Image (cartoon, grey):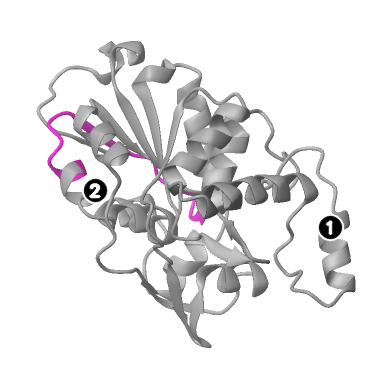
Amino acid sequence: MVSMHGYNSNVESYRFDDLNVVVLAGGVGGAKLVDGFAQIVPAGKFTAIVNTGDDFRHLGLTVCPDLDTVMYTLAGEANSTSGWGREGETWRTIEEVERLGGPSWFRLGDLDLATHLVRASYLDAGHSLTGATQHLCRRMGVTHSVLPMSDEPAATLVETEEGILPFQTWFVEKSWQPAVREIQLPKDVRATGAVLSALEKADVVVIAPSNPFVSVDPILNVYPIKAMVTDLPDIVVAVSPIVGGDAVKGPAAKMMREMGLAVVPQTVADH
């Protein structure tokens, strides 16, 4: 799916190291595309704006699954087996949490917990989520810009046959099985100055092959990201997560069927 505005030449004639590239990303598919661009676009000309609609509080910590997946992938530390968390993970802490009767349905590994603890300390000290993310990226050797879509909480809710569920309850605790009727996004969430600056400078915006309803829509829902992307004078490219009648990974195809949508790339393009 490619929408081009004010551009008549062959896309291949563009050199990516001459362009300011912004990728809107969430989940594993988004992280992989971000990693691919990071290998061909200089750090100063590339920004990933990442979904935070699936962030939530767990065990007293702010957990940012999509931000962390992008960050770990760029750092070369992503868990290649699970697709989430960090490589070489151990599980002693969460196993002890379970033994002590605490909530263990969201499996935080020991290395992953270190990320959440440092983030919590930064947030508690009055830093923004953007600032905490920048600190973590620096410490992990990530040189490309990784930005949360907003510094404000922006929780995604899933309306299902069992009622309205917080995203992680539906996605992880219930293994995304309750049938989806609608996705509910918060109102009045605003983008950060860093996000606005990246979009103002963008020559190309790429919408990653992330779930269009729970990864991409939450980003576009943040004011004024959708309007800025729509008004871009150059190129906007969307990569479909639907291939061969199914999702490359995750619940997108199942959600589309449950909402009465055809599971084809054109549906994603129309959406």
Asked if the residues shown at circle 1 and circle 2 are in contact, with their CB atoms under 8 angstroms apart, the answer is: no
Tag 2, which secondary structure?
Answer: helix
- In this view, 76 is above or below 87: above
Location of the N terminus (image quadrant): top left
Nearer to us in this view, 213 or 185: 185
Q: Amino acid at mark 1?
A: Thr
Can you give x and y, in whole percent of width and height, for residue 210 in the image? 45, 49
Sequence-wise first label, 1 or 2 = 1
Q: Amino acid at mark 2?
A: Ile
Residue at image mark 2: 225
Quadrant for residue 256, please give it: bottom left
Q: What range of the chain is rendered magenta?
A: 229-246
Can you give x and y, in whole percent of width and height, for residue 17 in the image? 35, 12
Name which residue lies at 17% across and 28% down: 234
Name which residue lies at 51% across and 42% down: 132
Q: Is residue 227 left or right of residue 179?
A: left
Q: Is residue 197 left or right of residue 49?
A: left
The numbered dot on residue 33 is none
